[in-house]
């Protein structure tokens, strides 16, 4: 992600990454507490801040799987792999 930020020269990019990481960690804590719907909202906010975070897409997929929405779980798991393989194709 840092490489993407350097290549695209965004000065706010590092702040977005930090905020996204904090939100992802909060979402993971909510998952641990079995508050899956709230975790989903937090992960979605994290993706808005940093749309090239494969870890967040993966966590979002796991949260959807926990509430029984297997279609969205599969969608976000695939999205995680897409972002990992080609982060430059996702716009900010």
Image (tube, grey):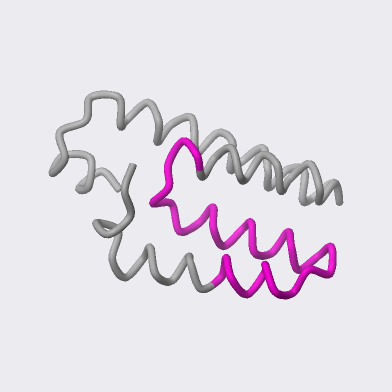
Counting from the top left corner in percent of width and height, residue 47 is at: 51, 45
Q: Residue at x 30, y 24 (%)?
A: 12
Q: Is residue 70 above or below residue 55?
A: below
User: Left or right of 27: which side holds 47?
Assistant: left
Name which quarter of the figure residue 30 lies in.
top right
Counting from the top left corner in percent of width and height, residue 26 is at: 66, 37
User: Left or right of 9: which side holds 56?
Assistant: right
Q: Residue at x 57, y 62 (%)?
A: 58
Count of labels in the image: 0
Q: Residue at x 30, y 32 (%)?
A: 13
User: Left or right of 9: which side holds 2?
Assistant: right
User: Left or right of 6: which side holds 64?
Assistant: right
Residue 55 lies in the magenta stretch: yes
Residue 2 lies in the magenta stretch: no
What span is colored magenta in the figure?
48-77
Q: Is residue 16 above or below residue 86?
A: above
Q: Residue at x 81, y 51 (%)?
A: 36
Q: Is residue 73 above or below residue 89?
A: below
Report the predominant secondary structure element of the magenta stretch.
helix
Counting from the top left corner in percent of width and height, residue 92 is at: 33, 41
Counting from the top left corner in percent of width and height, residue 19 is at: 48, 30
Viewer-nearest residue: 12 or 71: 71
């Amino acid at each position: 992600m840092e490489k993407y930020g350097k290549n695209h020269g965004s000065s706010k990019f590092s702040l977005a990454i930090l905020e996204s990481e904090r939100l992802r960690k909060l979402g993971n804590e909510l998952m641990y507490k079995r508050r899956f719907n709230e975790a989903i909202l937090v992960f979605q906010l994290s993706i808005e801040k940093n749309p090239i975070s494969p870890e967040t897409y993966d966590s979002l997929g796991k949260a959807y799987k926990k509430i029984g929405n297997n279609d969205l779980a599969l969608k976000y798991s695939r999205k995680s792999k897409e972002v990992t393989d080609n982060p430059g194709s996702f716009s900010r």
